[in-house]
Amino acid sequence: MSTPSAPGSVVGPATPPSRLGDMTRRGGWQASFFMLPALVLLVVFLIYPTIWTILLSFNSGRGLQFREWVGFANYERLFEDKRFLDLSNFPPTGALVNNVLWLVLYTGLCLLFGLLIAVLATRVRYETVIKAIVFVPMAIAATAVALIWKFVYSPDPDTGVLNAIIGGLGGNPIPWLGRESTVNYALIFANVWASAGFAMVVLSAALKGISQEVIEAARTDGATERQIFRRIQLPLLSLPIAVVTVWLMINVIKLFDLIYIATPGGGPNGKSEVIAFTMYNQTFEGGKGGYGAAVAVIMLLLIVPIMGFNIKRFRSEAVVQ
Amino acid sequence: MSAPAVSVATARPVTPSGRLVGFLTRSPVHILLVAVALIWLVPSVGLLITSFRSRSDIASSGWWETLSNFNFTLDNYQNVLSNQDMAPSFLNSLLISVPATIFPLLVGALAAFAFSWIRFPFRDTIFLAIVALMVVPAQMILVPVLRMFQDLGNGLTGQKDLITGSFVGIWIAHTTFALPFAIFLLRNFFITLPRDLIEAARVDGASNMRVFARVILPLSVPALASFAIFQFLWVWNDLLMALVFVQEPDNLPMTVRISQVQSTYGVEWHLLSAGAFALMAVPLAVFFSLQRYFVQGLLAGSVK
């Protein structure tokens, strides 16, 4: 029916054997020509540096050079560093603990807001407007998000709208980003604001993809609404939810720009530091290459299992194709 | 759980009182959504209004008070444009982002073609290995790649800053870092193109290069556009890589400049508000003009 495919289908599935043999013989050479630029770049500027950083994490690495080998000393020092992990008080503190807090709250709130807005928006006429409003922050830089919220959180009630509202209600202004007890929650909310749109778009697309006929069929077969939600909608949403969760979790582990701009020194007493911030600070401000490399390796080790889930998914998709 | 409310929304009341009942039943939904819209709009609108207020107005009153008296001014944007640090950085952001989008697009598309339409040994193994590289965070390559650039500069001309002092370093870093995702995305698109079409071109004597340029690329515009938009915004919005790989002050992109303005001048909202919106202008323009590709790219990019 489609004209372009006609010549191929006339020849049939058996393409002329000579041609095919020719193609496979030259395939290796031709393929390497096409792959060469990519492979060179990946080996030189991604694979080799990754090995380099892993090795550096076992070296003192002062001044970002290989000095003396120190075994696991960097990792040991890291876990004794109170700014990285402090289990002595309750609740525990430190950059790593902050990442856990982010993982739970940021991921949870993004999913919650995303699902809520996706479900509610389908019931009103201004659905596209509300979705665009929530989605737009996805496009802008974390640097801009940090400034927007730094402005909202400003301790001066003549600048920050949040403290102006609190002042209007008779409360005292709160230095949201300057107080140990509030800084992390303030930053997490700012980033939920920036990322919830992603969860919303994915989940909304998934919800709309669920065929009404299937739901109607279940209903005629006597399924209760609860059964429809639990047996049909929820299972069909589980994959998109998993995809969004993976994306959000990786976001948390790589989180740097927002913290760096909103709380330049790592917040009050370094209380807003996260591991990517520690890595940058120790390496480029402190010149401790080995120490920073150890943090980078920990980041990699945290991402691998999360991405492993995704790659499994790629594989099943590849099989289908 | 969600189904009962859906039936409320779909029921069409005929009488005015029926409509009122319908509206009131749905009003919690409206109230919630209006609250959501306010939370998502007010922070950016506040900063936007501030960017059009004079420095003294900003210091003396909140932006919401302009609702009564608004002295509109473009001074802040003029300041940003005439500021020796900020104005060139806008151009620098473009000079970094455009090539750092085109290079991985080209290099990635070539490799993706090999992985989808040329048969060779270990093809899928190599492809999976490249996809697996997506796990590597930028933090793993910052120090060694910086050192490599410096050593290369030293070796070539004796100047350590040869590469980090130009745009070449940041281009290479962004290109390489984007490749696993580019190859993954494009290969998975190329593979869906009709086999008959490519076989036909080959039977007609077209070389692989010709098949790639004349058949694959023209048919893959949606995937190429999605990747290009995603990558462009990624690079434009990037702070971390630019902090490390752009060492020449005259070459710094906006994200880095804004962070410096903040630390040198303190929190000067008249500069920062206008600077933030200058930084946002390009992504917002991309978003509103290419929304469809943008969302596609983002959905595909959920793996990055």
Image (spheres, coloured by chain):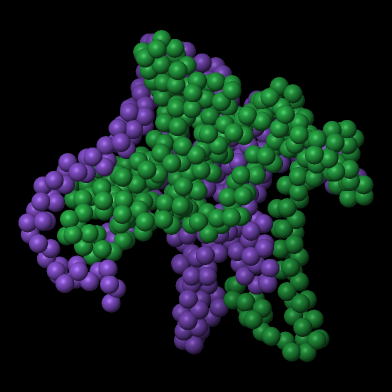
Residue B106 x/y as whole percent? 37, 43
Residue B246 x/y as whole percent? 52, 25
User: Is B111 situated left or right of A213 in this image?
Assistant: left
User: Is A167 situated left or right of B212 in this image?
Assistant: right
Q: Nearer the viewer, residue A133 or A73?
A: A133
Residue B261 x/y as whole percent? 69, 26
> Is residue B135 visible to us here?
no
| Residue B184 vertical position relative to residue A49 in the rendered view, above or below | below
Rendered residue at 44%/60% (across/down): A239
| Residue A8 vertical position relative to residue A31 in the rendered view, above or below | below
Number of numbered labels in the structure image? 0
> Is residue B200 visible to us here?
yes
Quadrant for the N terminus of chain A in the image: bottom left
Q: Which chain is green?
A: B
Q: Quadrant of residue B48?
A: top right
Q: Quadrant of residue B12?
A: bottom right
Quadrant for the C terminus of chain A in the image: bottom left
Residue B150 x/y as whole percent? 42, 17
- Residue furthest out toward the bottom: B15
Rendered residue at 31%/61% (across/down): B193
User: Is A315 situated left or right of A182 in this image?
Assistant: left
Rendered residue at 11%/56% (across/down): A20
User: Is A19 situated left or right of A89 in this image?
Assistant: left
- Residue furthest out toward the left: A18
Rendered residue at 88%/50% (across/down): B67
Q: Say which colour chain A has.
A: purple
Q: Nearer the viewer, residue B242 or A55?
A: B242
